[in-house]
Amino acid sequence: MDMPANGRNIPDGGYRREQESAIVTAILEAESILTAFQPIIGLQEHRRFGVEALTRFPAGTGTPDTVFHSAHAVGLGTDLEVLAMRSAINFLPLIPEGQYLAVNLSPTAAFDLSAWIQDEADVDLARLVVELTEETAVDYYPALRSRLAPMRERGLRLAIDDAGAGYSSLLPIVELQPDIIKIDKSLVGGIAADHARRSAIRAIVGLAQDLDAATVAEGIETIADLNTARDLGITCGQGYLLGRPSTDPATLNSEPVPHATTGAADLRNPRATRRSTVPV
C-alpha cells in the first residue's frame, strides 16, 4: 500500500483515482487543452471534405486516450468531452465553407450533451459531424437515436468511428443508421496486400451503400493502400499520407497534398438530401 503525501492510508486503487481526479480537475479548471485537426480527403477528386478535431493535453498528463479514460473513471468524462467539443467548435469559423468539422463523443456523452448541442444557437449543425466512439458495448441505441433525431433533422450528421474494431461494431451502424462510417485503421493498414482485409472492407462499403452513407478509411499511410481504398469504393481517406494532425489553425485553409486521389460522394450536403443518390 502506498502512503500519499498527506499521510492518509488509501488503497493503491483509491490513491490512483485521487491522482487521476486531480489531473483531470486541473485540466478542466485551467481549460488546458489544445485542439489538433486532421484533414479528411475525398478519394476521387482529391479535395478536403472536412477535418476531425483531436484533443491534446499538457505534457506529462498522459495520452489523450488515457486522460479521457481516467476522466470517465472518476466521473468527469462528460465534463472533459464538453470542454474538448467547445474548444473544437470555436474553430468552426476558420474552416472553409462547404467543409465539416468532426468531433468525437462517447455514446454516453452524446446522449448527455445532445441538449447542449441542440440549444447552442451559434453552431451550424449542418457543418458538424458527431463521431461516436465506443470502448464498451452499450444497450441504449434506440434511446440515443431518438435523442439525436431532432438535431439530425436540422443538419447534424452522425458518424460511427472505428468500424471493424471494438465492441459489437456492426450494431451501432444498424441501430443508428449513420451518415458516415469510418473504417478502423486496423482493417485499412495493409489492404493492398491482404485479401481478407479487402473482403471485410467490401462488406462495410456494401452496408454503407445500402444505408446511403459515406465511408472514410482511417490510417492511410501508403500509396498502395490509398489506391486500393479508392478502388474499393471508399468515399474518403484520413491518415498520415494525406495529412498529419496539426494544432496550427493556418492548416485549416491549406490545400491537400498532391497524392493520387479523392472523393466520389459529396459530404457537404445537409441531411435533408441524405436519401438521394449522393450520400452525405
Image (spheres, grey):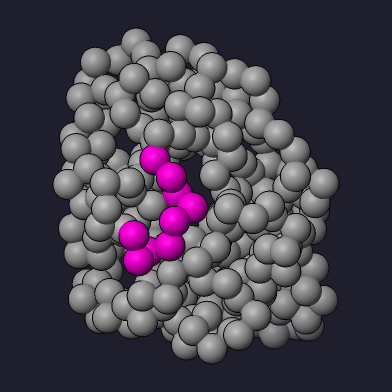
In the image, residue 209 sits, relative to residue 86, either above or below, namely above
Query: Residue 44's spot in the image, x, y percent?
Result: 45, 27
The reply to whether residue 74 is in sight is no
The image quarter containing residue 148 is bottom left
**Near-viewer residue (158 or 267):** 267
Residue 23 placement: quadrant: bottom right
Q: Position of residue 18 (x, y in %)?
A: 65, 77
Viewer-nearest residue: 22 or 121: 121
> Which image quadrant for residue 81?
bottom right
Left or right of residue 31, residue 52 in this image? left
Q: Identify the residue at image location x=21%, y=76%.
A: 142
Q: Is residue 44 left or right of residue 258?
A: left
The mark tally for this picture is 0
Q: Residue at x 37, y 18 (%)?
A: 228
- Determine the main secondary structure of the stretch shown in magenta: loop
Q: Position of residue 36 (x, y in %)?
A: 71, 51
Residue at left 66%, top 73%? 86
From this view, report whether residue 240 is shown above or below residue 231: below
Residue range corresponding to the magenta coloring:
265-273
**In the rendered view, would you say 31 is above or below 40?**
below
Q: Residue at x 25, y 57 (%)?
A: 275
Residue 212 visible, this angle: yes
Indicate the quadrant containing the N terminus: top left, top right, bottom left or bottom right.
bottom right
Task: Pick whichever, 96 or 245, lies toward us.
Answer: 96
Q: Is residue 145 left or right of residue 207?
A: right
Q: Position of residue 205 (x, y in %)?
A: 25, 37
Taking the magenta stretch, the answer to whether it contains residue 93 is: no
